[in-house]
């Protein structure tokens, strides 16, 4: 737009459309439109009207002069969806003793779904993520992004390769000797690298502060995955039921799994929020071991909250004798109170 060209609402709108979904500063808008000092008053009035209408832009809330350019949307024909379409996702299981979480009998997964694995450090989050990868790489194109699978110089990690080789039940290479999955050296801004219509495994999203941003991050990941599935690993505190970010970490999840310590040497997987359960699923838990250098799952069995200590792990005079301080007991061994 030249200095002589009249500033109009339509002209501003047309220029802003190229930045849909982004935040832009008023000074950048003025520079992009070549607004002259004599036009600035009119421009600010028109921009203010657009912001009040909230059809093209709105104040971003970050600071004065920043605007969120809104994405254009149109009505969706919901009746065109294929209600019979499910994503045939294979869930992790043990290949050392054939024990299983049986999650495939409890949870329905559809194209575009987001699975969150929220776990305490060193309880098997990565083992679960890699088992998801191994179980599905022969059926779907898979992408793995993570903080610990490559060096800071993007060289492949020997530790990561050893872990894969310890999963000797999985054949990681195709007939040409190439990897069946893609390993990307991404450590942040994962949402910008999600590959549409594939299984995208992200291990793990690290937020130093502003944990509320995880809601926006997972929303963008889910939006980008298309007809694929996103499996995202998050860190969780021992004292919290949810990952960092609290409710924000859970809002976009179609299946929310948490991993906590179970005694001194085992872990406990619990099903949280599930949007499409096949039967009662939320709240069910399984204890399991991690063997072979963090590679394989072992002795998976369902556990229930101890009736005596109600999951606390301690009784009136110390450690609960019924569950040995774990708060849970193997389901088949739970004794109902007399």
Image (tube, grey):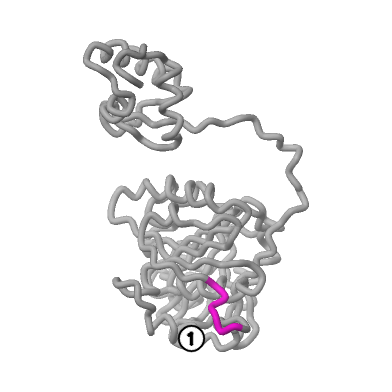
Residue 300 shows in this picture: yes
Local packing at callout 1 (Cα closer than 10 Å; few below 14, some 14-19, many 20+) is some
| Image quadrant where residue 277 sits | bottom right
- Residue occupying the point 65% across, 65% down: 89
| Image quadrant where residue 35 sits | top left
Would you say 98 lies left or right of 84 here? left
Residue 335 shows in this picture: no
Q: How many marks?
A: 1
- Residue occupying the point 37% across, 68% down: 147
As for residue 169 lying within the magenta part, the answer is no
What's drawn in magenta, residue-wise?
Answer: 176-181
| Residue farthest left in this picture | 37
The N terminus, quarter of image: top left
| Image quadrant where residue 285 sits | bottom right
50 over 128 or under it: above or below: above
The C terminus, quarter of image: bottom right
User: Residue 133: x percent and y percent?
Assistant: 56, 72
- Residue occupying the point 60% across, 57% down: 197
- Residue occupying the point 44% across, 34% down: 18
User: Residue 56: x percent and y percent?
Assistant: 45, 24
Observer-nearest of 334 and 251: 251
Main SS category, magenta section:
loop
- The residue identified by callout 1 is 291
Observer-nearest of 147 and 197: 197
User: Residue 109: x percent and y percent?
Assistant: 65, 58
User: Residue 222: x percent and y percent?
Assistant: 53, 50
Would you say 337 lies left or right of 120 here? right
Q: Secondary structure at mark 1?
A: strand
As for residue 177 lying within the magenta part, the answer is yes
């Amino acid at each position: 737009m030249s200095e002589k060209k009249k500033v109009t609402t339509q002209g501003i709108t047309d220029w802003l459309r190229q930045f849909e979904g982004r935040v832009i500063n008023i000074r950048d808008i003025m520079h992009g439109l070549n607004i002259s000092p004599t036009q600035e008053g009119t421009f600010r009035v028109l921009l203010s009207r657009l912001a009040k209408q909230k059809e093209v832009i709105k104040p971003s809330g970050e600071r004065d002069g920043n605007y969120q350019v809104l994405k254009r949307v149109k009505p969706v024909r919901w009746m065109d969806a294929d209600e019979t379409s499910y994503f045939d996702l294979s869930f992790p299981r043990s290949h050392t003793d054939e024990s299983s979480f049986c999650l495939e009998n409890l949870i329905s997964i559809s194209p575009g779904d987001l699975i969150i694995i929220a776990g305490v450090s060193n309880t098997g989050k990565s083992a679960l993520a890699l088992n998801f990868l191994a179980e599905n790489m022969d059926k779907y194109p898979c992408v793995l992004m993570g903080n610990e699978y490559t060096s800071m110089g993007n060289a492949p990690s020997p530790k990561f390769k050893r872990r894969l080789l310890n999963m000797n039940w999985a054949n990681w290479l195709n007939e040409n000797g190439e990897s069946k999955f893609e390993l990307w050296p991404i450590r942040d801004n994962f949402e910008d690298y999600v590959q549409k219509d594939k299984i995208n495994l992200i291990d793990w999203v690290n937020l130093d502060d502003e944990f509320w941003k995880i809601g926006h991050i997972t929303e963008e990941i889910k939006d980008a995955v298309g007809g694929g599935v996103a499996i995202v690993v998050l860190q969780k505190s021992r004292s919290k039921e949810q990952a960092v970010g609290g409710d924000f970490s859970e809002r976009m999840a179609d299946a929310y799994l948490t991993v906590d310590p179970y005694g001194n040497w085992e872990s406990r997987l619990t099903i949280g929020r599930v949007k499409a359960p096949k039967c009662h699923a939320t709240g069910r838990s399984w204890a399991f071991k991690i063997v072979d250098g963090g590679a394989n799952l072992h002795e998976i069995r369902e556990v229930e909250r101890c009736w005596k200590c109600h999951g606390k792990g301690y009784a009136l005079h110390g450690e609960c004798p019924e569950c040995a301080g774990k708060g849970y007991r193997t389901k088949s061994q739970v004794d109902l109170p007399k």
